[in-house]
Image (cartoon, coloured by chain):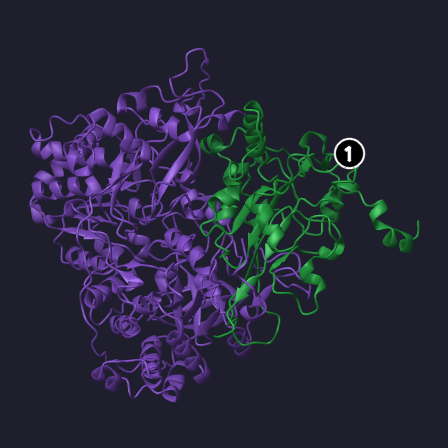
Chain colours: A green, B purple
Amino acid sequence: MSVTNLLENWSQFRQAHPVGDAPHAEYKWALSIDLDTCTGCNACSVACYAENNLPVVGKEKYDAGQMMHWMRIERYWDEDDREFPDQGAQFLPMMCQHCEAAPCETVCPAGATNHTADGLNSQIYNRCVGSRYCSANCPFKVRYFNWYDYPTTENVWPAEMTQQLNPDVSVRSKGVMEKCTFCVQRLTAAKSTARSEGRLVRDGEVQTACQQACPTNAITFGNLVEPESKIAKQWAAQQVELAREGQAKDEEAGGSDLRGYRIFEELRAYPSVMYLERVRESAI
Amino acid sequence: MIENSFNRRDFLKVMGWGGAAVALSGCGNTSVQDGVEIVTSYVEPAEYALPGIGVYFNSTCAQCDAGCSITGRVREGRVLKLEGNANSAINVGKLCGLGQAGVQAHYNPDRVRQPLLRTGDQGEAITWDKALGLINEKLGAVKGDEVAFLTGTVSGHSKVLLGNYLDALGSKNHYAYDAVSPSVVRAANKKAYGVEMPRLRLDKAEVIVSFGADFLGAWVSPVHFSQQYGQFRKAGKDGKRGVLVQIESKMTLTGANADRWLAIRPGTEGVLALGIINALAAAGVSVPADISASVKAYDAANVSKETGVSVEQIGKLAALLKARSPSLVLVGSAAEGYVQGSQIAAAVALLNQVLGNVGKTIEAPAHVPFPQIAATVGNRASLQALNNSVAGGKVKVLFSFGVNPLFTAPPALNFAENLKKVPFKVVFAHYLDETALAADLVLPLDSNLEDWGTSVPEYLTDGSQLNIQQPLMEKLHPETRGLGDILLALLKQRNANEYKDFEDYYAYLRNAVIKNKSALGGALVDDDTFWGETLSSGLLKLPAGASSLSGHASAVSLSAVAVADSAYPLHLIPSITANMRDGRHANQPWLQESPDPLTTIVWDSWVEMHPKKAKELGLVEGDIVEVASRNGSLKAQLYIFPGIHPDAVSIPLGYGHEAMGRYAKGIGANAFKLLDVVVGQETGELALHETRVKISKTGKRVIVVKDEGAAGGMQMHKKIAVRVSTDNVKLSGEV
């Protein structure tokens, strides 16, 4: 297969969800983050540590790039030669984008990471063999590898602190890859409740930990296939579509008056996370 | 996995902690006494401990004084996670990272577990009976006014008990201390508006101009302000999005979110405020004649020369404020920082008055109907006052809790040496921190998730409220005690008869609340129902009362800013970060590993310096530099930071503990130990930004451990974090 053939007929070769004859039924979980209200405060990141049993690795391992923050706040300055960052910093909460054509999934030799019917990029810990190919192939660098057995590492979870661990989330051991799950344990619980009541999960009934904590309500989460959900309305208002290559905003020269975009759209990974551009006042 | 099948509200109504007996006896099925986990059968679990099902209890966050209400998720008798309680108008269901780390204060492996008595250099574990007996004995040998209490901000019923205890001892020596408090702002507000903490309506403002008030980070009530900020930014139907301008010498988290961030020469904020008034008057805004005359000298060219803010920006700022109303002008570090901080704050208040914001975005605060439980707030001047008493040998017995003065006192006060003159020092402590290590007797406190209590936040929002603190789980360590219980035990030593009906603080608290049931809106229900509902909701709305703003606009005169000091050429800006604040929570590992939002540095201190200045001094990132003031010096890694005035360097407070615990000890350097004792002209408060420093290279260099990301914090011209001008976006149609 030539590269030209691959690029020209990408839609035939890509491994993506949903595929025409099996669309997302019932649920497609998606997220949006308004960068204009996000203040970069890190509350979401700490909430993620609390909810998902993330280990605190300490300075030395952090230096080696072995931090385990599923949700991180990236901070960017303007890359021109202005004397001061006089329009502030750019903050970007970054976590697994749950791509519909996830580059990580195709390279896993063990099939440990794959797509669920409700549109999550899932990670099966006890199938993971630790090849780390997925992390190498992730354009967003949001996969975190357990280089150590953290439960037995000194001062990660000393005696009393083990009691804080969330019993709904497994504690991972050495040699396993992990990443943001969209708080799948909360989703599972909500879906189970809804099913037993013979209905679908209502909009707003389930929140991810980061969304729940966000002091400015910058994060919206929900079911994209439910047209009345806030997330679906937000995506629609920004004319961002899940299975589209390049959004309305990207196609108009000089940008449109919309704010919604997905990161690395050109890689055609079809992320499930939409960001809304940060706005800056022109009158000052 | 059937957690959500429970309607949480209903569940809480049924399940609110019914009473201390229930709460403390059958709380869970695990116990960690002696570190052994006891697994008990689920055949007959306690009524509310349903295996596999999380239950939620409401309480109050104690990580800072903002008084956010929290909801703790409890499973099998263990508290797992803290979230915001939606019932509270303060945090409306939200919680910051600092608040969420409260579980790590509770489960912290370095908590003090037994009363400790000093014998030489060692702490000997003793019983509570012996400890309390010893206090009684020591108090018997001194006069009432030789006893002093040093605390942080106190409110609620523990304040009442503390007051009663001091009365019983015949002492008036209560020193409420907070090393990073907004004390100058309080004093200035009192003068300008008649109240210390007016209610600020960020959500109603169209423009916010903030002189160093880090309201999204660590100023006053950050979660509340963040929530308002969300509304301020959202355009809504009318398409109006609030504009934030931040003016400061070192960029704070709030500054990093501003539409325009203006680097100002340290200490000249008042000049700019008066300059804006002058520009507004020139643009036709009605300004009283005496005021416009008093600011005549502050024309744009002079102001620009003085402050370093361009004439063009001053003009734009005045035009923006004239065009969009209501606005809100805030003052934070500009007031706390400088000798003439009060005048700077007065200039800002004058600007608010000229803009007509008083009554629109600055409202009268909620009235607290019971002054005896209202917050007694900490300030910095009280430490100087206590230090004078201690140095003069006037204090024979000192009690201390909630503060760590040995860590936060500026070296020139010589507080550690002076403290040795106090023959008997008792510290109620969570950790063996610097102050606890200097004590003669250390009494171990319950964690805030194990203790009973009430509090009234200083900054109130929609009506005043009494926050309820209740245990979210069984005590981890059998020998710790609640603050209220200790005070009650001490009071019983003085006045056994009056307190004999109260077996413990819980009984006292329940009685105190129920006694005032009708005033608290519970006239129609029986005691148990009222108490149960109070505990379920986690807070009590207090009855409304009249409150109003007073004060008037009057001219402000500023004195000249101090000239440069050639021996110590740089201004030191000790920064108050949302994670570390004054360092009291440094032993919570989530806070150490959660990167500083602006530098992304973890697990260490750093010195921020503008790239231009660094180039001039031949310094690069990671250079270990020595920062020396007249009173102290420290070594730390250099971080090149564009968001700082070239005449200043900044070091975060809260790092550099010599004790406290495994996650805090030896991490970074303590910037409090650089501070010169320079106090505000009007308030006597320590001026935090008045210290001058010099920087020298040590020749060592390290790799700064930070989270700037794969590309070193560069977007490499990829579209990652994107910014758009208001000219190119239509906000009114957004969802």
Numbered marks: total:
1
Nearer to the camera, B222 or A195: A195
Residue B606 rendering spot, x and y as whole percentages: 48, 61
Residue type, mark 1 in image:
Ala
Subunit bearing disc 1: A
Nearer to the camera, B255 or A150: B255
User: For numbered disc 1, what is the local secondary structure?
Assistant: loop
Asked if residue B429 can be seen in this view, the reply is: yes
Determine which residue is flagged by label 1: A110
Residue B24 rendering spot, x and y as whole percentages: 31, 23
Q: In which quarter of the image is the N terminus of chain B?
A: top right
Task: Classify B566 as above or below B236.
Answer: below
Residue A21 rendering spot, x and y as whole percentages: 79, 37
Q: Is residue B318 left or right of residue B555?
A: right
Residue A112 rendering spot, x and y as whole percentages: 73, 34
Q: Residue at x 29, y 32 (%)?
A: B535
Looking at the rendering, which quadrant does residue B531 occupy?
Answer: top left
Question: Please, which residue is most extreme toward the right here?
Answer: A1
Task: Classify B113 as above or below B733.
Answer: above
Looking at the rendering, which quadrant does residue A193 occupy?
Answer: top right
Q: Is residue B333 left or right of residue B425?
A: right
Q: In this view, does B137 lie to the left or right of A21?
A: left
Q: How many C-alpha atoms fall within 10 Å of the one at disc 1: few (<14), some, or many (≥20)?
A: few
Q: Residue at x 40, y 55 (%)?
A: B228
Task: Classify B562 as above or below B216.
Answer: below
Nearer to the camera, B576 or A36: A36
Question: Please, which residue is most extreme toward the top here?
Answer: B43
Asked if residue B656 can be seen in this view, the reply is: no
Nearer to the camera, B187 or B722: B722
